[in-house]
Amino acid sequence: MNRRIVLKQMIWMGAAIAFMPSCVYKQDKLSIQLKRLQISPDQEKMLASLADEVVPTTNTPGAADLGLHLFALKMADDCFDDASLQKFSAGLKQFTEAKSKKATLGLQQAADDAALKDFARMYKSLIVRGYTQSEYYMTKLVPYQLIPGGYKGCVPVA
Amino acid sequence: MGYLNTKGLKERTFDAIVIGSGISGGWAAKEFCDKGLNTLVLERGRDVKHNKDYPTTNMYPWQFEHRGQLTNEIIKENPVVSKCYAFREDAMHFFVKDKEHPYVQEKPFDWIRGYQVGGKSLLWARQTQRWSDFDFEGPARDGFAVDWPIRYKDLAPWYSYVEKFAGITGNKDGLPQLPDGEFLPPHELNCVEKYFSGKMATVYNNSRPVIIGRAAHLTKPQQIHLDQGRAQCQSRDLCQRGCPFGGYFSSNASTIPWALRTGKLTLQPNSTVHSIIYDDKAGKATGVRVIDTVSKTTTEYFAPVIFVNAAALNTNLVLLNSTSSRFPNGLGNDNGLLGKYVAFHNYRGHVNAKYEGFPDSTTEGRRPNSGYIPRFRNLHKQETNFLRGYAAGFGAYRPNAPMNGWGTDLKAQLDKPKPGVWGVGSHMMGETIPKENSMVSLDPNQKDEWGMPVMRINMFYDDNDEKMVQDYHEQLVAMFEAAGFTDISTNDSKQAPGLDIHEMGGVRMGKDPKTSLLNKWNQLHACKNVFVTDGACMTSTSTQNPSLTYMALTARAVDYALAEMKKGNLK
Ligand SMILES: Cc1cc2nc3c(=O)[nH]c(=O)nc-3n(C[C@H](O)[C@H](O)[C@H](O)COP(=O)(O)OP(=O)(O)OC[C@H]3O[C@@H](n4cnc5c(N)ncnc54)[C@H](O)[C@@H]3O)c2cc1C
């Protein structure tokens, strides 16, 4: 895997953190400053491992390498409307409780649970988005062309 | 108001003044400067220099903090402008934010504005279809508004003139309802679009053509474009950020730098025109009062001819605000119709579907353009229970197949996406009927930060529009069914007027000073040295995107103004 890219991705997260006023409130051990979403450092750890359930690290980078749980948190925190954020927060709380009773509970399993499925799906789609919109993915896997140079209306499927 | 005429009178006197530097003002500036007139362009917004001031233009998707998406905070602060599809993280800086310039919505109206050098020309979708006599004869044939004082033949040479300079891609389709222009090579329809076009030709016996849009892109730049410093369009389809190649037409890439190179242009950003000065004794306009948006001081500038190109509604505002003892209700407003008969385009209807055909084909690259279905309803004669008709956008695309599952299975699908079923979509662009009670006015009390009266907007859909949405849905569904498309769904966005960004009228052209404000040369009937050539001048709205017509009207009006100046009729 390309260390440089992963590093850059992390710097981007870091930069985002640097922009935020540090005095909003103390979240000692969180690695990202959030404005609206309240989570604990333990939850952050849990979210990191759940992200790897969606896009695992194999012989190529996965969620953990790309810091996708931080991307997900940032997007939820900044972009979700109030109703979605509320749903996500409540779901996270419920999931955390369920997991404290059953340590093996994963995101995939939660996606089939009536009470937990909204959270599981929201989080999964944030992780998928973070992956497919990462520099790594858009340069190494499905290269994004800033300058395509043209358009062909009918070509055979590769 | 305190005047601060620090510069001498001579330095504040020009041969021509143009209010606004967007699509139409840019053209007025270019034409005047080309003919050697010392021209002052007053622009209320900041300067935006080609390339230099396109901060996001070369950014990759992952370089945007939110990957292009708007934050909840921005949406909440901007309930109006955030509805515009182009108001995203990469181009937000070219739009007016809701709080910056408030206005009163007597009825819901999404007023989408770009206040900067270049106006909305940086942001537009670049669709440039000519109007035809089916449009210019509309009001007379169907008995609404007033008759246009011009016909297609009056404008045809000017369409050609502006098209050659702006650079328009298109296909010569030979359609009387959508006249051909001076085209650079067309963009390509993709396999499904071509199939649909062919199918419709058979099913409807060539009465519902489906063609590639005509658009302001340099698919093959000519010398005149290279001379502007522009290069071939690279199909980036990131136009709203400003194009480093000058691949599409904007004032910033084309008319403004061209005019600046003549040495005749004085481009003055941060200058809001408050009103036009009318001299009772001389019986003409003599200049403009300008508020410096930074220092908030007012200065007067003078010229024998004034072009008002502030974009449709702001042009109404400037004229309504130009009161004098001769014109107590606004400049040129003897008949009380200034601000009335404003209209827009009805973009509410959408139809989407899937197509199972062409499984082995896809597209490559990007295309800053789409398919287009010219108006076919009530074209040759009245045939429905509503007046006029609609054009439609049409496009097909091949998305990725859905990706399901978890973990390594999901990752494998994400890493090598497979093409899914083709999607097709259409949206309507309906003509709306200008009505006297569809109008804009000045709020009698509220003023903005710069002392300009706040605009009141009262525009609305009527029964004709409702019927048209319904008919569009019915017709497009029938067409999609005939083509074998599946999963057909219709949608009525119910979006407020304004979001079409094609607001027009209020200072309409006409033959009779009793029922119109402008004559056939875009001159105010009652104040001949003031010309209006932006959307405000439009007598009716047609179904075509209007900006190409503003360009043609502007070039034609400047040509006329120059001739009149030569004859000594405009001093
Ligand atoms: C997302 C989007 C897509 C669009 N797609 C299309 C399309 O495909 N085809 C099409 O034909 N049209 C399209 N349009 C509409 C098109 O942009 C406008 O029709 C066109 O820009 C109008 O030109 P204009 O010169 O009248 O106004 P503008 O380009 O808006 O320029 C007006 C200028 O006047 C300035 N101004 C206003 N008031 C004052 C004042 N009092 N004093 C000084 N300056 C002032 C403004 O700041 C602005 O710079 C689109 C618009 C948008 C936003």
Image (tube, rainbow, N blue to C red):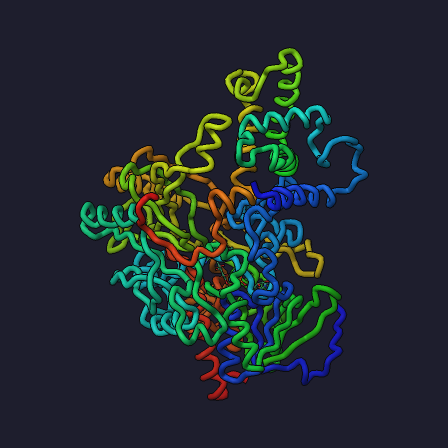
Q: Is residue B283 among the parts visible in the rendering?
A: no
Say which of A81 and A31 sits in front: A31
Q: Is residue B380 left or right of residue B445?
A: left
Q: Residue B324 location in percent, x, y?
A: 63, 70
Q: Residue at x 69, y 31 (%)?
A: A37
Q: In the image, what residue occupies the spot 58% across and 78% down?
A: B265
Q: Which is more toward the observer, B456 or A117?
A: A117
Residue in view at x 55 percent, y 29 percent:
A56
Counting the numbered discs, the total is: 0
Which quarter of the rendering shows the C terminus of chain A? top left
B417 left or right of B455 in image: left
Q: Residue furthest top?
A: A101
Relative height, residue B237 to residue B43 (above, below): above
Which of the 4 image quarters holds residue B490?
Answer: top left
Left or right of B341, for residue B119:
right
User: Where residue B215 sits in the image (x, y, percent)?
Assistant: 40, 60
- Left or right: residue B374 versus residue B494 is left
Quadrant, the N terminus of chain A: top right
Residue A88 visible in the displayed image: yes
Q: Is residue B438 above or below residue B566?
A: above
Which residue sits furthest bottom? B567
Locate residue B364, reporting x and y percent. 38, 50
- Work out whether B518 lies above or below A32: below
Q: Nearer the viewer, residue B309 or A130?
A: A130
Q: Quadrant of residue B184?
A: bottom left
Q: Residue A79: x, y in percent?
A: 61, 38
- Identified at 52% across, 56% down, the residue is B240
Q: Which quadrant of the view contains residue A136?
A: top right
Q: Nearer the viewer, residue A110 or A4?
A: A4
